[in-house]
Image (spheres, helix red, strand yellow):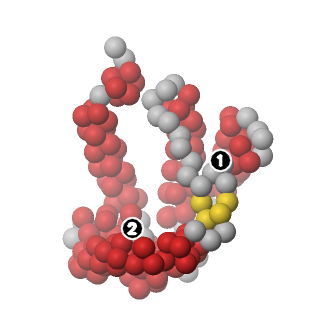
Amino acid sequence: MTLLTRLHTNARLQLVMGLLIGIAFGFLLQKSGVTDYNVILGQLLLQDMTFSKLMVSAIIVAMPGVYLLVHFGCAQMHVKPGTLGSVVVGGLIFGTGFALLGYGPETVAGAAGTGALDALCGGIIGMILGSGLFAALYPKIKTRFLNRGPFPAQTLPELLNMNPWVAIGIAEFVLIGILILL
């Protein structure tokens, strides 16, 4: 039995693999320096492109990786339908937290793990309080805002009626070009 077959059928192995991948992701975030507030500030001021380079590199690796996992039956892709309202509300919540603290969700967790008190106190506590507030307000904002302006659940290749591997090839070419420019 191959590792991929065992991973597909074993929930405990999936959890262990998820934990190991999460640890590796956190390690790489920390080692790349993007958990440092000054690097994030430099990105926002367009003076330090470390964060952009990391994210573009992650997309270059993850995009074909996800499709390979789906192709070999190790994963399933379920694209949820979206709404303009949920994108706007989510963007406002994310943007407010980012503007107040200077960290995103992934970088605040990494910075807290390195002992940054601003990330630990302001970020982690803020995420917990913000999640609780959103959960409390969810019934009211669901019908008023979140369900407005629906759009279909389609991947870009589905929307363009294109073979996913062709779309990935084009995207990889463009993203590698962007990475070289950065």
CA gap between label 2 and label 1 equals 24 Å
Where on the picture, by quarter, is residue 98?
bottom left
On the image, numbered disc 2 is attached to which residue?
A: 105
Where on the picture, by quarter, is residue 170?
top right
Location of residue 182 in the rendering, given as x and y in whole percent from the top left corner: 62, 62
**Crowd class of label 1 (few under 14; some 14 to 19; many from 20; radius 10 Å):** some
Is residue 119 visible from the viewing direction of this image? no
Mark 2: amino acid: Pro
Location of residue 181 in the rendering, given as x and y in whole percent from the top left corner: 67, 59
Q: Up-down: is 2 above or below 92?
A: above
Q: Is residue 36 left or right of residue 87?
A: left
Is residue 176 or residue 17 the one in the foreground? Answer: 17
Which residue sits at x=65%, y=63%?
150
On the image, numbered disc 1 is attached to which residue?
A: 155
Location of residue 60 in the rendering, given as x and y in whole percent from the top left corner: 58, 46
As drawn, the residue found furthest toward the right would be: 161
Element under disc 2: helix
Q: Up-down: is 163 above or below 171?
A: above
Which residue sits at x=26%, y=69%?
112
Mark 2 vs mark 1, foreground winner is 1
Quadrant for the N terminus in the image: top left
Element under disc 1: loop
Mark 1: amino acid: Thr
Is residue 153 or residue 117 the one in the foreground? Answer: 153
